Image (tube, grey):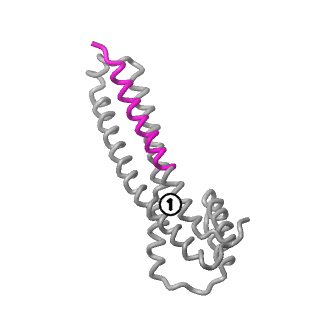
Amino acid sequence: MTKPPPESSLEEAIFVGKVLTMMANRMVTELVAFSSWMILGFSAVLGLLLANLDTVSKFLEPTTTGMVVKLFAMSVLLHVVQRYLAAIVMAGAALGKELESVPPKNIDVERFTQKLEEATLWPTRYMVRWSNKKILAGDLAVGGRMHAVLAQVLAWLAFAQAIAAITAALFIANSLQS
């Protein structure tokens, strides 16, 4: 375990954690909007394709529609995971903001972290347990770093979602027959 930072850097560690959380929150907010618009556009294209299947099927290879539906399903799954991760980051940022108005209390940190862990279910409990160990070891920026990592994972998922949408468009374009 890492040893606790000297008293002079506690404030700095807390500040770094706050900055990382707010950066992650901003990034997540933009990515969720982008991802939602992408799902909306993909849904509209797929809806038009399926609504006009009788007409469109004359111009498309038979397997194209099935592949596009599968890519859409993958895109929706990626979007759901993104929204889950976004909820974690956004809730953390909102909670941090709300806690700024609460005056610090003299609490037993070990007991407090234990109660936090007891209040969470699997799989979140493992994440809480891991961050609690880091906090008890003096790493007060762990929450901010975790939010930053989750935001970056969310960005990669949005990128994968974009690839799925582009791949679907390429499937449609490549299967067009005159």
Residue 175 on the magenta segment: yes
Query: Which residue is at 48% across, 83% downward?
Result: 102
Which quarter of the rendering shows the N terminus?
Answer: bottom right
Residue 37, position in %: x, y?
Answer: 33, 46
Residue type highlighted by circle 1: Ile
Above or below: residue 66 compared with residue 5: above
- Image quadrant where one finds the C terminus: top left
Q: Position of residue 11 (x, y in %)?
A: 55, 76
Image quadrant assignment for residue 110 = bottom right
The picture quadrant where one finds residue 29 is bottom left
Left or right of 157? Residue 135 is right
Q: Say which of 21 and 125 sits in front.
A: 21
Name above or below for residue 169 compared with residue 127: above
Q: Is residue 13 magenta?
A: no
Q: Which residue appears at 38% of the width and 32% of the height?
A: 166
Res 98 → quadrant: bottom left
Horizontal side of 23 relative to 134 (left or right) equals left
Viewer-closest of 78 and 30 = 30
Q: Which residues are magenta?
A: 153-178
Kindly identify which residue carries mark 1.
88
